[in-house]
Amino acid sequence: MRAAFLALHQLHQLLAGHSVVLMSNNTTVVAYIYKQGGTFSQPLCHLVVKILRWLEEHSVSLSARFIPVKRNVLTDNLSRVTQIVGSELSLNRQIANKVLTLWGSPTVDLFVTSLNSKLAL
């Protein structure tokens, strides 16, 4: 819910006077927005009230839709920036060290990311 609140504030100039669909894999967030509050979590309810006030002030219409994690791959991966993406191949560190010892260390790794680097900087 906080991410939605911050996104609305960040994008206020683009959103003013428009309709927005929030897609979330969090059913509680979707329910609280859809029902305009709830009774289970008081802090969450207060945040929804803040969002509703902000929406009214900026003439923004907000609806929420649930999107399963398996259909939300890009966003899910972006939220896990410290983890190697499942589709990214990488050698085991010990095997990479053996290969580098045997064949020498290259000066450039064309397929490196900040998470799978094997060469010393």
Image: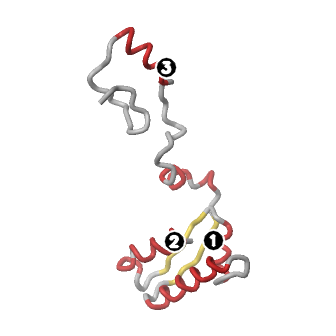
Please report the residue visible at 37 percent of the width from the left and 77 percent of the height from the top.
14
Residue 69 screen position, x and y as percent: 62, 54
Please report the residue visible at 51 percent of the width from the left and 68 percent of the height from the top.
3
**What secondary structure is marked by label 1?**
helix
Q: Quadrant of residue 72?
A: bottom right
Crowding around mark 2 (Cα neighbors within 10 Å: few <14, some 14 to 19, many 20+) is: some
Residues at badges 1 and 2 in contact (C-beta under 8 Å)?
A: yes
Residues at badges 2 and 3 in contact (C-beta under 8 Å)?
A: no
Residues at badges 3 and 1 in contact (C-beta under 8 Å)?
A: no
**What secondary structure is marked by label 2?**
helix
The answer for how far apart the CA atoms under marks 1 and 2 are is 9 Å
Residue 99 screen position, x and y as percent: 42, 14
Mark 2 lies on residue: 4
Q: Earlier in the sequence, mark 1 or mark 2?
A: 2
Q: Earlier in the sequence, mark 2 or mark 3?
A: 2
Mark 1 lies on residue: 29
In the drawing, what numbered circle is on residue 94? 3
